[in-house]
Image (cartoon, rainbow, N blue to C red):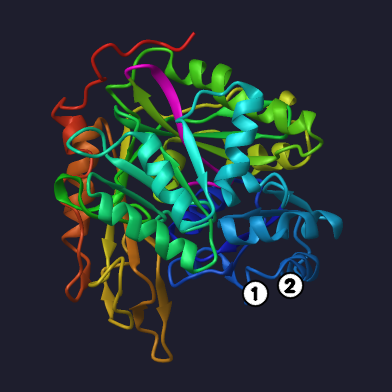
Amino acid sequence: MRVLVIGSGAREHALCVALSSDPAVTALACAPGNAGTRAIAEPAAVDVADPVAVAALATSWRADLVVIGPEVPLVAGAADAVRDAGTACFGPSEQAAQLEGSKSFAKHVMAAAGVPTARSWPVGGPAELETALDEAGAGGGSAPYVVKDDGLAAGKGVVVTTDRDAAVAHGRRVLDAGGAVLVEEYLDGPEVSLFAVTDGTTVLPLLPAQDHKRRDDGDGGPNTGGMGAYAPLPWAPPGLVEEVLATVLQPTVDELRRRGEPFSGLLYAGLALTSRGVRVVEFNARFGDPETQVVLPLLETPLAGLLHAAATGTLADHPPLRWRDGAAVTVVVAAPGYPERPRTGDPVTGADAEGVLHAGTTVDAEGTVRSAGGRVLAVTAVGDDLAAARQRAYEQVARVRLADAHWRTDIALAAVEGRITLPAGWVTSP
């Protein structure tokens, strides 16, 4: 099988690592790729936001399977273009990808499917923003305000704050730029990321993981695309995956198929385990970053066959997934100034070690690896348990060099120390 991966981040590097170890894969390319993927996958130039260019590359490279990593090409319709050109593609259609591209669309789908989620108020103008914040009944020392960009925002389009002025300012920035906003009720309890591979009918959930969104230790600082992750979750309640499959994932896939917009690819459910049960925080239409970096190293099932089965509608015939024992932790090494104004162009050393996944890197004319994005590396380690994986990850972080780099020192620490608890009154959803 000739497999073409579209994208240039650590998620795509993790996909390439998993695919390169699959004996069914005879050729592997990553477009455009980064300094890390070049070691295991052929690089290729492509504008990922141009569906025609993506499809043309798939055809010229003679791909048997295209795996689209980022959300931008999916929302632009790249998966449709690839399939129309006659190549199997792992990724939802443009219409189905609106589950991530439009939070309002996702809310409509969840309402029709009976999927539990936060109450929300769509906002189209400044007056509606003020009214929505009033109706949300937040702030004033109670639950925070939650204001979200309705469209794509690279994981950074949400403000959660008890400061009403800050909530209004974020909403108005989006509105003034021509976007739309969603105000939501605040959801208490720990958050969980759960991926599921689907062909539009059959749904196979993967291991749950937890992402760390805030930039600084103790969940301080601004929201980011993700500063680290770990899997599995030792504190997760029994039967969580089965419950989410029954109440969230399968109903959503069934509803989209009923609408004539079947979702085939990776459905990512961001969940809150609240005092009222499981609630959906958001959907993504692709593998999450950095959660992919900890889920895939624990998957024993060959990845190419799994993704190809989803892309060709044969997932019901695929064998049950197999998982390795142990745990995985990834720590993101970010450029100075991330996420607001990351500095790029600095040399990076120590990034060729095992487990170091490249997120935002490039190679200059002299062969030096340099930073090329806000999140530069995702340092990943596997261990017999979460504590061992965490220790190994931070030992490896200490070996990489990037001037003025920033990383959190507490990834997975609360889970290792047993400090993550479900909210009082948490119950399994009916």
Coordinates of residue 380 in the picture (x, y in percent): 32, 50
Where is mark 2, residue-wise? 53
Is residue 159 found left or right of 398 in the rendered image? right
Residue 370 makes an appearance in the image: yes
Q: Residue 179 at what x, y percent from top left? A: 53, 61
Q: Which amino acid is tagged 1?
A: Val
Q: Is mark 1 in CB contact (under 8 Å) with mark 2?
A: yes
- Kindly state the secondary structure of the residue where label 1 is placed: loop
Relative image position of residue 163 (x, y in whole percent): 22, 49
- Give left or right: position of 60 versus 24: right
* Residue 219 sits inside the magenta stretch: no
Q: Which residues are magenta?
A: 275-288
- Identify which residue, 300 or 184, lies in the foreground: 184
Along the polypeptide, which appears first: circle 1 or circle 2?
Answer: 1
Residue at 34% of width from left, 55% of height from top? 168
Tell me residue 189's x, y (percent). Answer: 29, 27
Q: Can you identify the residue that label 1 sits on?
A: 46
